Image (tube, rainbow, N blue to C red):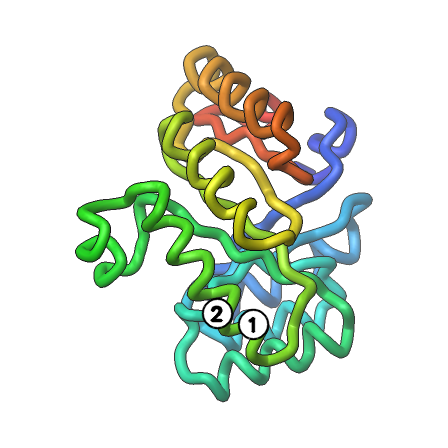
């Protein structure tokens, strides 16, 4: 029902969190009934990614460095590559690797970029290039600077957004400023407004 409401509101892509195998099983109905492309958001468990790939999803949000051994990553990438399903690497300032934070003294733009490049290299080493990247912080300037830095290094599509932007009015203002800058500079190919509000308000 929510996907259909978002479709009517003008949404063009749906991302669905898949935290466990029960959710992966439920996703089958969502994919079958969705008028929009469905992207599965996976963390830590490669089995969830494999289960979702079997359901006909249109994309994965997955950080390959977080799902275990190289063999597990290779298994997911092999299926995604065979089915031409893109993988979005989603870097969030609130969950950067501890060694990268220590090196940079916190979740700086450079730290976010180093994290993204670490994940990108894992996929590239497996000859996978259907990659999108997002670099989200909760403040505008750090987010925009991270995208600027990464754009000097790679030429993959970027998914833009300000994470944890806030409630409807302040979150909409913060997102408008951040996304406006990213779009003006050609640094966002898809976007999401992240609000503490019903998702229709995000659209």
Rendering coords of residue 13 (x, y %): 71, 42
Secondary element type, mark 1 = helix
Depth check, front residue: 19 or 136: 136
Q: In this view, does 93 lie to the left or right of 5?
A: left
Residue at 50%, 40% (x, y): give it: 147
Q: Nearer the viewer, residue 186 or 88?
A: 186
Which quadrant would residue 188 be assigned to in this image?
A: top right
Q: In the current view of this chain or complex, which residue is farthest to the front? A: 152
- Residue drawn at (30%, 42%) of the image: 108
Whether tag 1 and tag 2 are in contact, CB under 8 A, the answer is: yes
> What residue is at 43 percent from the left and 73 percent from the top?
67
The picture places residue 200, in percent across and down from the top left corner, at 62, 25
Among the two numbered marks 1 and 2 on one chain, the one whose residue lies closer to the N terminus: 2
Question: Residue 163 appears in which quarter of the rendering?
Answer: top left
Q: How far apart are marks 1 and 2 (CA)?
A: 7 Å
Q: In the rendered view, does 44 fall on the left or right side of 76? A: left
Residue 81, given in percent of the width and then of the height, sits at 71, 75
Q: Which of marks 1 and 2 is in front?
A: 1
How far across and how far down the image is residue 101, in percent? 23, 53
Give the answer, above or below, for where 83 lies relative to 135.
below
Instruction: Identify the residue under disc 2.
Output: 64
Label 2: how many Cα within 10 Å (few below 14, some 14–19, many 20+): many
Q: Is the C terminus in the top left, top right, bottom left or bottom right quadrant?
A: top right
Q: Extreme right residue here?
A: 35
At label 1, counting other C-alpha atoms closer than 10 Å, the crowd grade (few under 14, some 14-19, many 20 or more) is many
Vertically, is 125 above or below 157? Answer: below
Residue carrying label 1: 123
């Amino acid at each position: 029902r929510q996907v259909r409401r978002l479709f009517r509101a003008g949404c063009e892509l749906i991302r669905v969190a898949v935290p466990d195998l029960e959710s992966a099983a439920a996703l089958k109905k969502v994919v079958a009934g969705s008028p929009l492309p469905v992207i599965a958001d996976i963390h830590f468990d490669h089995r969830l990614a494999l289960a979702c790939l079997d359901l006909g999803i249109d994309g994965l949000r997955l950080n390959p460095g977080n799902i275990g051994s190289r063999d597990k990553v290779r298994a997911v990438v092999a299926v995604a590559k065979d089915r031409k399903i893109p993988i979005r690497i989603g870097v969030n300032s609130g969950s950067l690797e501890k060694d990268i934070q220590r090196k940079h003294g916190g979740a700086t733009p450079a730290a976010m970029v180093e994290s993204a490049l670490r994940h990108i290299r894992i996929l590239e080493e497996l000859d996978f290039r259907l990659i999108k990247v997002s670099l989200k912080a909760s403040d505008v300037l750090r987010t925009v600077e991270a995208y600027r830095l990464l754009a000097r290094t790679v030429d993959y599509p970027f998914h833009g957004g300000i994470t944890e932007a806030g409630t409807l009015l302040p979150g909409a203002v913060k997102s408008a400023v951040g996304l406006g800058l990213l779009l003006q500079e050609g640094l966002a190919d898809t976007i999401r407004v992240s609000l503490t509000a019903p998702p229709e308000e995000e659209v």
